[in-house]
C-alpha cells in the first residue's frame, strides 16, 4: 500500500468534513430528512476514517494481532454497506416525501434491513471461511471470491430506488428528479472503476459523490424556505400541492390567517413579532408527523397533511382552533391572537394548486364573517364562490359594454328647503336584469382591480351631467373616491381633464373620502388634497362614525362637509345616547366651520329633530331615494311636489 492510495482517502475525508461544517453552520431546519442526512455524514466520515485505520494496520500486520485486523476490517465492510443502506433509505424518504403510500415505504425499508442482515451474516461467516477477505500465513491481506458482494447489495438498492422513481415520478419534486438523474450514473461509474481497478481505494470517493449530490438537494430546498420562519414558502406550497395532485394523493389543507398583528409589532417590537411568527410556524410543523407547514403570506400559514378520514381531519382543525384560543408566550407576557381558519380536503377532484389556493382564500373571507371564524370548504362554499366569480365576470362585461348605470340620490338642504345637490351612486344588473347590491360588487371591484374603471364611469357621467345642467338647478354632485383611485398618480390630471372636457366649475364636484383612505398615506393625502383645493374642488368626509372615526382627520384636512353615518342616525332621536352624540358632533363641526350631512334619515321624527338641531343637509329615503338620471332631472324640475310625494320609503338594492 503506498501513500497515493491513502492520500485519496484523506482527500475524501477532507471533503466530507467540509460538507459537515457547511451543513452544521447553516443549521437548516424544517425538513424531516435532516436527521437522516446528519447520520449519512457521520457514518460516511466514520467509514473513511476506519478505512484509513485498516490500511495502516494492514501495512504493519506483523505488529498487530491477527484478530484485531480481522475485527477492524470486518467492521469496515459492515460500515461501508451501512452507509450505502442509510443513503438508500434517505433517498427513499425524499422520493416518498409527497406520497402517502406507507405500504411501499415499509416494503422498501424491510428489504433494506433484510439485505443488510444478510450481509452481516456473510461477514460473520467470513471470519472462518475467508470468502470476502482473509490474511494468509505471511499476514498479507487477500481478497476472497465474494469480496464484491457488498457492491452487489448497493446495486440492488440502486435498482430499487430507480424502480420507485419511475413508478411515482409524477409525485416527485424537481430537485429529486435531478438527483435521480445524476446520482445513479455517477455511482455506477465510480463503482465500476473500483471493481476494475481493485488496487485503487476509491470507496471514499463514491461516498463523497453521493453526499455532495444529496447536499445540493438540501441547498435547493433551502431556497424554497421562508426566510423568517424556516417553514415552506408560498412557492414551495404550490409545488407541494402539484406533486400531491400529480400522484393522486388524498390530503387536507388548513389555512390560518392572523389579524391585527400590527398592534403586537407596535407594542412589543418587530423582533418579538417575528419571533412569535416563528413559534407559530414551528408549532404547526410539529403538529402532525406527516405534515408540512408553509408561510404563504405575511400573516397566513398553511398546514398540509394526509387525509385519513372526516373524523381525524375535523379533530386536527379543532386542535388548531383551540390552540389559538390560548395565549402565546412573548417575552415576559402572554398575547392573544385574533385569527380565522379554513380547511379543504382533496380526494381526486379535478383541481390544481391555483384552484386550491383560491378556494382557501375565499373560505377565509367567509370565515372572517362567522362568529367562530372557522369554516370548511364544501359544496355550499363552492357555490358562493361561483356566484362571486360570476359577478366579477359580469362586472368585466359591464365595463367593456358600458352597462353600468349612475343613479343620483337627492340631498335636502334644510336652510332653503330645496334639493340642490345629490350623491352619485353606481348601479349594476346581472344578465337576467336583477339588481346587484353595491355592497357586493364594489368590494369585489376593489379586490380584483376593476374599481378604477367603475369609478371612471361614475366620474364621466357626473361630469357630463354637471356640464349639461345649470348651477342654479344643480349646485353640486358628490362622488365617493376609493383608496386606489385617490392614491392614483393620474387623479389630479384626470379631474382637471374632466372639468375642462365638460366645462363645469370644479367646485360643483364634491369628492367624498372615507377615513380608511386618509389613513393609507397621510403625507401623500395632504399633498393631493392641497393641489385639488387650489384647483377649486371640494371635499367631504364620508361615513363619519364608523370604523376609523377620529377628530384628527377632520382637524388635519380641509373638509367642507362631514357626513354622519346612518348607523348614528338609526336610534335618533329616541335613543338618548344617540341623540346626545349626534347633537354634540353637529355642534362641534359647526364650530369648525364644517357643514353637516345626516345620512340614512328614514322618518319624519328623525328629520324634524335634526332640523331643529341645525343640521345643514339630509340624505335619506324619507325625502328621496336613489334614482336614474332622467328621473332625477325630472325630480329637480318638480321638486316642490316631489317633497310631498316621495315621503314614502323607496328602496333600491
Image (cartoon, rainbow, N blue to C red):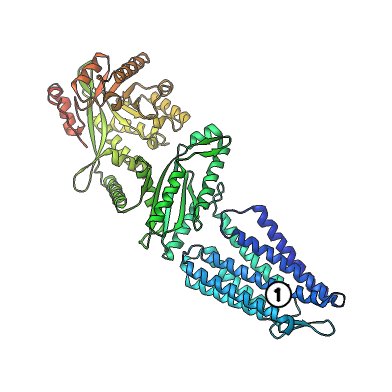
Residue linked to disc 1: 77
Residue at the extreme right = 63
Identify the element where label 1 is drawn.
Answer: helix
User: Is 102 in front, or is 148?
Assistant: 102
Tell me if residue 504 can be seen.
no
Q: In which quarter of the image is the N terminus?
A: bottom right
Q: Residue 53 occupies which quadrant of the picture?
A: bottom right
Q: State the residue in front, 35 or 480.
A: 35
> Few, some or many C-alpha atoms within 10 Å of disc 1 (few <14, some 14-19, many ≥20)?
many
Q: Considering only vertical position in the picture, is 271 above or below 140?
A: above
Looking at the image, residue 541 sits to the left or right of residue 620; the answer is right
Q: In which quarter of the image is the C terminus?
A: top left
Q: Is residue 464 visible?
A: yes
Q: Where is residue 651 drawn, in percent x and y?
A: 19, 33
**Numbered marks: total:** 1
Residue ID at (32%, 32%): 480
Q: Is residue 225 above or below residue 197?
A: above
Give coordinates of residue 519: x percent, y percent: 43, 30
192 with respect to 492 (left or right)? right
Picture quarter containing residue 370? top left
Q: Residue 104, position in %: x, y?
A: 49, 70
Q: Where is residue 152 in the image (x, y as percent from the top left)?
A: 63, 80
Amino acid at each position: 500500500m503506498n501513500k497515493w492510495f491513502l492520500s485519496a482517502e484523506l482527500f475524501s475525508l477532507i471533503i466530507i468534513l467540509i460538507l459537515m461544517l457547511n451543513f452544521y453552520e447553516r443549521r437548516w431546519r424544517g425538513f424531516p430528512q435532516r436527521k437522516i442526512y446528519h447520520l449519512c455524514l457521520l457514518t460516511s466520515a466514520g467509514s473513511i476514517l476506519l478505512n484509513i485505520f485498516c490500511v495502516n494496520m494492514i501495512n504493519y500486520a506483523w505488529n498487530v494481532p491477527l484478530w484485531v485486523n480481522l475485527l477492524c476490517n470486518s467492521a469496515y465492510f459492515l460500515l461501508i454497506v451501512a452507509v450505502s443502506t442509510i443513503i438508500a433509505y434517505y433517498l427513499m424518504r425524499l422520493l416518498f416525501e409527497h406520497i402517502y403510500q406507507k405500504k411501499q415505504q415499509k416494503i422498501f425499508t424491510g428489504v433494506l434491513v433484510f439485505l443488510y442482515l444478510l450481509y452481516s451474516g456473510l461477514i460473520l461467516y467470513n471470519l472462518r471461511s475467508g470468502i470476502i477477505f482473509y490474511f494468509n500465513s505471511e499476514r498479507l491481506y487477500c481478497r476472497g471470491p465474494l469480496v464484491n458482494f457488498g457492491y452487489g447489495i448497493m446495486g440492488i438498492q440502486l435498482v430499487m430506488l430507480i424502480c420507485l422513481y419511475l413508478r411515482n415520478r409524477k409525485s416527485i419534486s424537481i430537485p429529486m428528479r435531478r438527483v435521480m438523474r445524476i446520482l445513479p450514473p455517477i455511482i455506477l461509474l465510480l463503482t465500476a472503476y473500483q471493481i476494475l481497478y481493485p488496487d485503487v481505494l476509491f470507496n471514499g470517493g463514491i461516498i463523497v459523490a453521493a453526499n455532495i449530490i444529496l447536499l445540493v438537494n438540501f441547498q435547493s430546498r433551502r431556497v424554497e424556505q421562508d426566510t423568517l420562519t424556516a417553514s415552506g414558502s408560498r412557492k414551495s406550497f404550490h409545488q407541494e400541492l402539484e406533486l400531491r395532485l400529480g400522484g393522486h394523493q388524498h390530503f387536507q389543507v388548513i389555512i390560518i390567517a392572523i389579524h391585527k398583528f400590527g398592534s403586537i409589532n407596535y407594542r412589543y417590537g418587530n423582533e418579538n413579532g417575528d419571533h412569535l411568527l416563528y413559534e407559530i410556524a414551528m408549532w404547526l410543523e410539529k403538529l402532525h408527523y406527516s405534515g408540512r407547514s408553509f408561510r404563504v403570506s405575511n400573516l397566513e400559514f398553511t398546514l398540509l397533511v394526509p387525509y385519513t378520514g372526516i373524523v381525524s381531519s375535523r379533530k386536527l382543525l379543532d386542535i388548531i382552533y383551540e390552540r389559538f384560543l390560548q395565549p402565546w408566550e412573548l417575552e415576559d407576557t402572554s398575547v392573544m391572537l385574533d385569527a380565522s381558519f379554513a380547511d379543504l380536503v382533496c380526494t381526486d377532484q379535478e383541481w390544481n394548486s391555483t384552484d386550491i389556493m383560491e378556494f382557501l382564500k375565499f373560505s377565509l373571507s367567509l370565515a372572517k364573517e362567522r362568529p367562530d371564524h372557522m369554516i370548511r370548504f364544501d359544496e355550499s362554499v363552492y357555490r358562493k364562490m361561483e356566484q362571486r366569480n360570476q359577478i366579477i365576470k359580469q362586472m368585466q362585461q359591464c365595463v367593456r359594454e358600458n352597462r353600468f348605470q349612475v343613479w343620483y340620490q337627492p340631498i335636502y338642504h334644510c336652510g332653503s328647503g330645496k334639493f340642490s345637490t345629490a350623491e352619485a351612486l353606481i348601479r349594476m344588473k346581472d344578465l337576467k336584469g336583477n339588481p346587484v347590491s353595491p355592497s357586493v360588487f364594489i368590494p369585489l371591484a376593489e379586490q380584483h382591480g376593476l374599481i378604477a374603471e367603475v369609478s371612471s364611469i361614475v366620474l364621466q357621467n357626473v361630469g357630463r351631467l354637471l356640464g349639461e345642467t345649470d348651477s342654479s338647478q344643480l349646485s353640486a354632485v358628490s362622488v365617493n373616491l376609493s383608496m386606489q383611485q385617490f392614491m392614483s398618480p393620474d387623479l389630479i390630471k384626470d379631474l382637471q381633464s374632466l372639468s375642462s372636457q365638460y366645462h363645469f366649475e370644479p367646485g360643483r364636484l364634491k369628492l367624498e373620502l372615507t377615513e380608511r383612505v386618509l389613513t393609507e398615506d397621510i403625507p401623500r393625502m395632504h399633498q393631493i388634497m392641497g393641489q385639488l383645493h387650489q384647483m377649486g374642488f371640494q371635499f367631504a368626509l364620508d361615513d363619519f362614525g364608523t370604523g376609523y372615526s377620529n377628530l384628527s382627520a377632520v382637524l388635519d384636512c380641509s373638509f367642507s362637509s362631514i357626513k354622519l353615518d346612518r348607523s348614528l342616525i338609526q336610534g335618533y332621536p329616541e335613543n338618548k345616547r344617540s341623540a346626545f352624540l349626534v347633537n354634540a358632533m353637529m355642534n362641534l363641526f359647526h364650530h369648525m366651520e364644517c357643514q353637516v350631512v345626516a345620512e340614512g334619515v328614514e322618518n319624519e321624527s328623525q328629520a324634524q329633530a335634526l332640523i331643529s338641531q341645525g343640521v345643514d343637509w339630509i340624505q335619506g329615503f324619507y325625502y328621496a331615494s336613489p334614482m336614474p338620471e332622467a328621473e332625477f332631472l325630472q325630480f329637480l324640475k318638480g321638486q316642490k311636489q316631489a317633497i310631498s310625494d316621495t315621503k314614502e320609503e323607496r328602496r333600491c338594492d
